Amino acid sequence: MSYVIPTELGTPGCGTPRKQYVSVLRDIGLPTSRREDWRYTKLRGFDLSRFGQSDEVGSIDRTTLAQHVCRETAGQIVIVDGVFQPQLSVLPAQPGVRAEHASGEALQLPPIPSGELQSALFLAVNAALAPHLTRVTVAPKTRVEGPLELVWVSTSSGVTYGMHPLVQIQVGKHAEVTVVERFIGLGTHETLTNMRLDINVDDGAHVQHAKIQKEGAAAWHFATTIFHLGADTSARSNIVSLGAKTARNAIHVHFEKPGSEVWLDGLFVGQGQQSLDHYTVIDHKAPHCTSHELYKGVLQGQAIGSFLGRILMSEGAVKSATDQLCRALLLSQDAKANVKPQLEIDNDDVTASHGAAIGNLDADAMFYLQARGISVLEAQSLLIEAFTREVLQKLPCNLEEPILETVLARLA
């Protein structure tokens, strides 16, 4: 196992020199709670130097994999312990859809978003250490039949290692595609996943993105998803965060042209001493755009769940609208939720609303159900189901029911 930070400019042909990111790694340390955008992320005990790239790859057969993934897809890319598995993957066969892996001279490193270089340590780590790039391209006017599924599996090999997935999805004009990410942890050992996903949506295109994170109990999971939206586009992102010791999902949305709409929905379910953190930034730069956010959390034990959502309304975002809502349900006295909506508006000709609520199970509803012969556990399960379905029912590919079963089983 090895952990090497490059010292040179990187491989020839890299779109952005690795040296830029290496300097960030050396000049700044881990984010602390003094940083507003990291104040809720639990990083105690995290040591980046422990997570090298694994020289050992565990095994997983198709039967085991089939228990965790979609039955029918337009394509499936499987990465096991950080290594692409062609024998488990099914590359897209539909005309107009292409998936490929690039490394060495073909690896084009994306830039870190302007103004975020010094605060985005994990993006810098990803850019410096990503061994390859997974690139998916959907041609204009192509309607992809079935989801494209990206699967990362951490096996029970027992090796402590780090994965730094780097993925770019380019959706052509007036195309339609559904992308499902899955992170599956089969072991109990410590691992690191540090993911960057760029989704570039051309004019008139429609994208649905779903992410199911079920990493192992000792895993560290950091992920950044960046949407760049053209004119008259629509994008929906649904994130379900269930696993990992500490998980942070960051989403950045950039409205670059008018007439687009985005929905960001998330569900985080924590138990034990889990820390599940969600950070979103929606940058309204163009006029006549709309954004919606709905995040919900269910927490028990000593789990901590957090949502920090920034909405930026610039002077050019005339006739734009945004609404944001986060609700958290606490099932124990020691569980904790942090919710912070943050609106920054530099335009009088916009509509904006936000709301937040943290509480326990409704005592009246519990009494009503028990009075009709329903046990305490069954009543609690019914109320949790009703609370979480508002998010889960928006998942694509018939994911709602199996995810709900997992949620209820974890909280039983």
Image (spheres, rainbow, N blue to C red):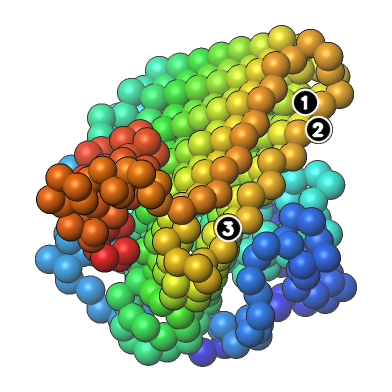
| Type of the residue with mark 3 | Ala
Left or right: 247 with respect to 22?
Answer: left
- Give the residue pinned by disc 1: 313
Say whether marks 2 and 3 touch (CB < 8 Å): no
**Mark 2 packing: few (<14 Cα in 10 Å), some, or many (20+)?**
few
Tell me the residue at 62%/34% (across/down). 355
Q: How many marks?
A: 3
| Type of the residue with mark 2 | Glu
Question: Residue 257, percent across and down?
Answer: 68, 18
Disc 3 and disc 1: Cα gap in Å? 27 Å
- Give the residue pinned by disc 3: 337
Q: Which mark is residue 344?
A: 2
Is residue 380 or residue 224 the one in the foreground? 380
**Mark 1 packing: few (<14 Cα in 10 Å), some, or many (20+)?**
many
| Type of the residue with mark 1 | Met
Question: Residue 195, percent across and down?
Answer: 54, 59
Q: In what element is the residue under mark 2?
A: strand
Left or right: 268 with respect to 342?
Answer: left
Disc 2 and disc 3: Cα gap in Å? 23 Å
Say whether marks 3 and 1 touch (CB < 8 Å): no
Is residue 115 or residue 292 the one in the foreground? 292
Q: In what element is the residue under mark 3?
A: strand
Q: Quadrant of residue 143?
A: top left
Question: Residue 380, percent across and down?
Answer: 29, 54
